Amino acid sequence: MEISKGVDIIDLCLHFKKEKTLVISDVHMGYEEALNKQGVLIPRLQYAETVKRLENILKGFKLNRIIINGDLKHEFGTISETEWRHTLGILDLLAQHCRKIVLIKGNHDTILGPIAEKRGLEVKRNYTIGKTMIIHGDKIPSGEKFDSMKRLVIGHEHPAVGLQKEGRLETYKCFLKGKWKGKELIVMPSFNIITEGTDILKEKTLSPFLKQDLDDFKVFIISEGVYGFGSVRDVKRL
């Protein structure tokens, strides 16, 4: 489904068709290990399920580049042995399907440098495609380059919506599309398969870009496919 001119939603990713570029956000590899350390015991399926989902998305694609829009890993202050293996495994998988990998710094990426160096990659603050800037979304940049952009793509928020279905509430990851100070703003869901994310209908938003009325933002829910649900206002009425 096209979310913006020249940009399709492919599962939890964005595909810039002309530029043959795929954008992935907020993988948070190591999330389940962090939960286990806190006493929340869950089966360790994150890596295997992430690889399976990525392989399904990438099948048949010939890409120039893949951009990870922040938070490839979860832990702030350390890199566990598991994180080393799993983040490098994800990067190696992506490298089989593109000419170049771009890593954008997220708020969880305080120690991403050593992992990037292992594969000869740089960690960037942002990446531009024409008049589109891809940034993590935890901070608002400044400067002429940022001011000149027409479209922004952010992660960080992990947007989701809760919908009532047969008497129970089910939460679905979603894309959001709206405006920020005259610029088109696309908000990506997380690629963390352990959690659905933040229900924007009930919870406070995290990103400074979303400290505004979201009622006019368009909602694209990800389930077995991609479903346009109209505006946030429309979803609230369901």
Image: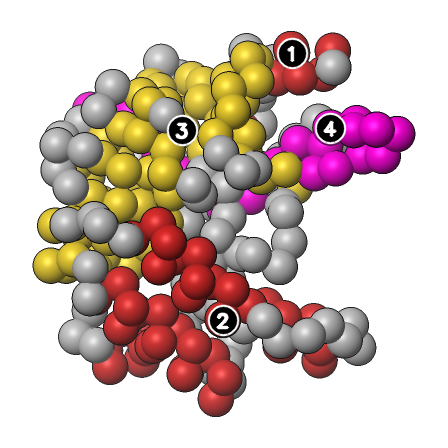
Up-down: is 36 above or below 74?
below
Q: Which class describes the residues within 10 Å of circle 2: few (<14), some (14-19), or many (20+)? A: many
Residue 47, labelled with which disc? Answer: 2
Q: Amino acid at mark 4?
A: Leu
Say which quarter of the image contains residue 109: bottom left
- In whole angstroms, how far apart are the C-alphas of marks 4 and 1? 13 Å
Q: Is residue 124 above or below residue 115?
A: above
Is residue 208 among what the camera can see? Answer: no
The first of marks 2 and 3 along the sequence is 2
Report the residue marked by disc 4: 163
Q: Alpha-carbon neighbours of circle 1 within 10 Å: few (<14), some, or many (≥20)?
A: some
Q: Are marks 2 and 1 in contact (CB under 8 Å)?
A: no
Secondary structure found at label 4: strand
| Category of crowding for the residue at label 4, using alpha-carbon neighbours closer than 10 angstroms: few (below 14), some (14–19), many (at least 20) | some
Element at badge 3? strand
Q: Residue at x 54, y 38 (%)?
A: 224
Range of magenta residues: 144-171
Q: Quadrant of residue 41?
A: bottom right
First along the sequence among labels 3 and 1: 3
Percent coordinates x, y for residue 7 in the rendering:
27, 28
Q: CA distance from mark 4 to mark 3?
A: 21 Å
Residue picked out by circle 3: 186
Mark earlier in primary sequence (2, 1): 2
Name the foreground residue: 2 vs 166.
Answer: 166
Point out the tag, 4 or 2, that comes first from the N-terminus. Answer: 2
* Residue type (three-letter) at the residue carrying disc 1: Arg
Q: Are marks 4 and 3 in contact (CB under 8 Å)?
A: no
Given this view, does label 4 or label 3 mark the residue nearer the observer? 4
Q: Are marks 4 and 2 in contact (CB under 8 Å)?
A: no
**Residue holding disc 1:** 233
